[in-house]
């Protein structure tokens, strides 16, 4: 065990040379320009326009207008001294109908963006899918349909052929658990369906899309870039059987096929009343279990679970939106218990020890798999005053979580970098513009950008590799 402050408020810790400090965004959350240069609707355009789905009726039509202000945003990344920028590519900009030839204007935008990073000495980390499925593919059934995985491979090949000579790290999917289980199970994310079987089918076809996508990229991308996938892991505490059930449908439904070549037997048993898993076809698991160079780790909070005895109120403090539908098919007896604070503005508990615990657990499970933290950050009620945002709570949050990451490094975890979520305040999915995760403040009236105190603190860390006070 490492030593340090019990509250994870260390300083002076040195990160190794080559450790990649960066920040992350997602296309629909920041780009805007929703109807420009050939782009057509994604499922999030449709969902956001559905009354009652997004707080305040907000949409990503303008968002941060990154589509037109990308050079300014890259200047901010450069001026902060960050090594990397993790961005996502909007599938409906590349294939507006979800299939067929590429839209050249869309490819040109991302080509300019990548060139802009390289000109500024920023390492591009490209994510192919951060939830904005072209609406025509959803109209044809979406991720529950096998064909969507094949269309994703086609899309991956188009993007890889256009950008592969300059992008050194490719991520296929961001948080497929959210795409499958919040989108098709709980209905709180696009496309807003509440169908347990569809959620399980979607999870499998997302896994298949990952495997087929990596194969497609390898067929067109020159050299030997890093290939990855990003998962949002549930860090679970509580009763052993409840932990096992949620671990199966939240974590191992992806790590099993992706990293071990098989779905867990207990997951199949737990979900037998929902699905017979006949949608897993011969050869799928071989296609899915492609070698990856990095496993992306997204972490925000922990969960406390217990078995419900069927009496009284079943607790549902899982922080995944207000819905009667469950994102956990096969785990109907599990309840999510409230946890002590402090909390972020999302209502998520702040637990840096959970990040250390997660990284060590992944090392035990997959000892030869390099890791990168691809998202970690927090939403707070930031106020711009006299040209400054004094976000002391976020700065403290980041300091404690970087301490957790450093402790994992000291215990032998092969951790290659840390991408803070998020570079900019942005459209926070079903919460609209009500939650601010950025280390850079965005005034949604003027779209002016202002680095917060947390950005200046992070800049010092990135430049020196030493954790500041």
Image (tube, rainbow, N blue to C red):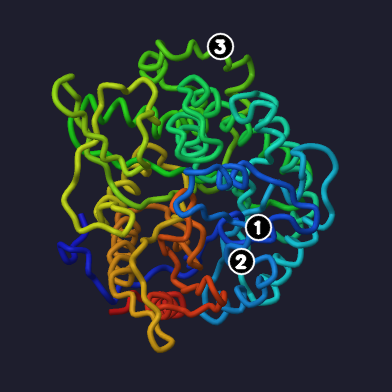
- Residue at numbered disc 3: 278
Q: Residue furthest front?
A: 51
Q: CA distance from mark 3 to mark 2?
A: 42 Å
Residue 288, given in percent of the width and then of the height, sits at 59, 29
Give the total number of marks visible in the rendering. Answer: 3
Q: Earlier in the sequence, mark 3 or mark 1?
A: 1
Comparing 90 with 445, the one in front is 445
User: Which one is in front in this view, the residue at disc 3 or the one at disc 1?
Assistant: 3
Q: Is residue 367 visible?
A: yes
- Residue at numbered disc 2: 123
Residue 45, given in percent of the width and then of the height, sits at 62, 47
Question: Which residue appears at 70% of the width and 66% of the height?
Answer: 113
Q: Are marks 2 and 1 in contact (CB under 8 Å)?
A: yes
Q: Residue 351, located in which quarter of the rendered image?
A: bottom left
Q: Earlier in the sequence, mark 3 or mark 2?
A: 2
Check the picture and name the quadrant holding the N terminus. bottom left
Quick check: 144 above or below 315?
Answer: above
Mark 1 surroundings within 10 Å by alpha-carbon count, few (fewer than 14), some (14 through 19), many (20 or more)? some
As helix, strand or loop, the secondary structure at mark 2 comes to strand
Q: Earlier in the sequence, mark 2 or mark 1?
A: 2
- Give the side of residue 9 with respect to residue 81, left or right: left
Q: CA distance from mark 3 to mark 1?
A: 37 Å
Check the picture and name the quadrant holding the C terminus. bottom left
User: Which one is in front in this view, the residue at disc 3 or the one at disc 2?
Assistant: 3
Q: Are marks 3 and 1 in contact (CB under 8 Å)?
A: no
- Residue at numbered disc 1: 168
Question: Which residue appears at 60% of the width and 59% of the height?
Answer: 87
Question: Which residue appears at 25% of the width and 22% of the height?
Answer: 333
Mark 3 surroundings within 10 Å by alpha-carbon count, few (fewer than 14), some (14 through 19), many (20 or more)? few
As helix, strand or loop, the secondary structure at mark 1 comes to loop
């Amino acid at each position: 065990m490492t030593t340090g402050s019990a509250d994870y408020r260390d300083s002076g810790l040195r990160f190794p040379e080559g450790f990649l400090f960066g920040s992350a965004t997602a296309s629909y959350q920041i780009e805007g320009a929703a109807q420009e240069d050939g782009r057509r609707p994604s499922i999030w355009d449709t969902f956001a326009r559905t009354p009652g789905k997004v707080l305040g009726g907000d949409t990503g039509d303008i968002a941060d207008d990154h589509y037109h202000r990308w050079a300014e945003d890259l200047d901010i990344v450069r001026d902060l001294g960050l090594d990397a920028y993790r961005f996502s590519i909007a599938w409906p900009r590349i294939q507006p109908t979800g299939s067929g030839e590429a839209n050249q204007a869309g490819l040109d935008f991302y080509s300019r963006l990548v060139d802009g990073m390289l000109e500024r000495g920023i390492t591009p980390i490209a994510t192919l899918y951060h939830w904005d499925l072209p609406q025509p593919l959803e109209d044809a059934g979406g991720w529950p349909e096998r064909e969507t995985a094949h269309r994703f491979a086609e899309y991956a090949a188009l993007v890889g052929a256009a950008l592969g000579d300059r992008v050194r790290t490719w991520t296929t999917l961001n948080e497929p658990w959210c795409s499958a289980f919040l989108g098709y199970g709980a209905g709180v994310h696009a496309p807003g369906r509440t169908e347990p079987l569809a959620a399980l089918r979607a999870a499998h076809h997302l896994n298949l899309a990952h495997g087929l996508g990596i194969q497609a990229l390898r067929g067109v991308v020159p050299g030997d870039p890093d290939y990855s996938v990003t998962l949002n892991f549930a860090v679970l505490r509580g009763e052993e059987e409840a932990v096992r059930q949620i671990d199966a449908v939240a974590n191992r439904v992806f790590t099993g096929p992706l990293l071990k070549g098989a779905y867990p037997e207990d997951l199949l048993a737990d979900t037998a009343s929902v699905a017979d898993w006949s949608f897993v076809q011969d050869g799928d698991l071989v296609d899915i279990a492609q070698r990856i160079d990095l496993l992306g780790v997204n972490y925000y909070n922990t969960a406390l679970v217990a078995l419900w005895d069927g009496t009284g109120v079943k607790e549902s403090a899982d922080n995944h939106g207000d819905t009667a539908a469950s994102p956990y098919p096969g785990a109907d007896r599990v309840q999510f218990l409230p946890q002590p604070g402090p909390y972020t503005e999302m209502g998520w508990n702040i637990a840096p020890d959970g990040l250390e615990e997660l990284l060590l657990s992944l090392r035990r499970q997959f000892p030869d798999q390099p890791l990168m933290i691809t998202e970690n950050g927090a939403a707070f009620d930031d106020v711009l005053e006299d040209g400054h945002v004094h976000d002391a709570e976020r700065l403290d949050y980041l300091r404690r979580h970087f301490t957790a990451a450093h402790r994992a490094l000291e215990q032998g975890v092969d951790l290659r970098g840390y991408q803070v979520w998020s570079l900019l305040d942005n459209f926070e999915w079903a919460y609209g513009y009500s939650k601010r995760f950025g280390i850079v403040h965005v005034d949604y009236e003027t779209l002016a950008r202002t680095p917060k105190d947390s950005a200046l603190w992070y800049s010092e860390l990135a430049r020196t590799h030493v954790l500041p006070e």
